[in-house]
Amino acid sequence: MPLERSYLFVPAERPDRFDKALASGADRVIVDLEDAVRPEGKEAAREAVATWAGRTEAMVRINGLDSPWFESDVAAIGRGGITRVMVPKAEPDVLRVVRHELGPNIEITALIESVAGLMQVRKICTESGIARVAFGNLDFSLDSGVEEADRELDPVRLQLALESRHAGLPAPIDGVFPSLADPSALAVRVARAKALGFGGKLCIHPSQIEPVNGGFLPGTEELAWAERVVGAIEAAGGGAVSLDGKMVDRPVVERARALLAKRR
């Protein structure tokens, strides 16, 4: 299956937006019971998610284990037959509780948004039921005291990508880009995340879906290069070949073939 690139948040207390979110073109919709819902709206939001016809297609972000809403969220997910959850402030002990409560068939996306989570990311990546890791960059910035004006959190991203790779997980999901008025800056952030080994991004508005989806695909120049590499190696019958004055060895060929496999 193609790797999911765009994950669109929709507030769980806005059921009028659920079906629109599914039709938005996002690879996955995340119905958010956590940050996007006021405390007084939690119960109604939970019920809306549990009874929504499209709930099995979406992912649900629950409230954290340390919140007063965790148990009710878990009960609603079990009642609604939801199989994909995003767990905030992920740590190994938290993930084990979630899986114990929801059973072995639950698919968990672990949201790394604290220093404590980062320090345990290797254990997180190998916990049973983990499907993918995501970066909660805004909360991580707050918890760590590191303000992200530009590249300050890129070392964290690289670590998440390497740990995901080491554990055999899909490429991780980058955090949100909060500005809706700067599409060129969003494109830069997507390109940077892709270069650091990420494979998708969290979106807060439908307008971000297209640039995110396109940004994680190989560009025209990348594909042209990959086609030339593969063509050259096939023409040489699998032997050593030089292209543009550079030796084409196995890692180069494998990268070219991986790029071609990701084309639209």
Image (cartoon, rainbow, N blue to C red):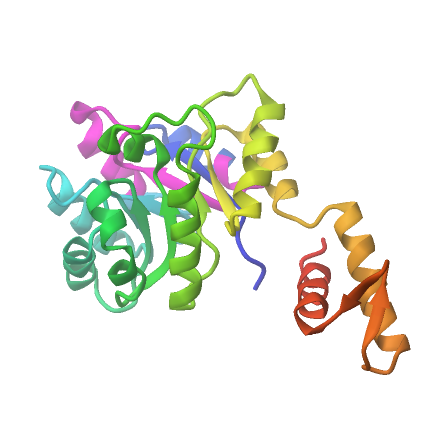
Counting from the top left corner in percent of width and height, residue 163 is at 38, 59
Residue 23 magenta-highlighted: yes
Residue lying at 56% horizontally and 31% vertically, measured from the top left: 208
Residue 31 on the magenta segment: yes
Residue drawn at point x = 34 percent, y = 25 percent: 147
Q: Which quadrant would residue 61 be assigned to in this image?
A: top left
Horizontal and vertical percent position of residue 235: 90, 76
Residue 171's place in the image compared with 32, above or below, is: below
Instruction: Please determine whether, in this image, residue 58 is positioned above or below residue 180.
Output: below
Residue 216 appears in the figure: yes
- Residue at image position (44%, 30%) is 17
Total marks placed? 0
Front residue of 227/12: it is 227
Which residue is painted at 16% across and 50% down in the image?
75
User: Is 19 displayed left or right of 138 in the figure?
Assistant: right
Q: Nearer the viewer, residue 111 or 140?
A: 140
Task: Please report the bounds of the magenta region as a residue range.
Answer: 21-49
Q: Quadrant of the N terminus?
A: bottom right
For the view shown, which residue lies furthest in the top direction? 181
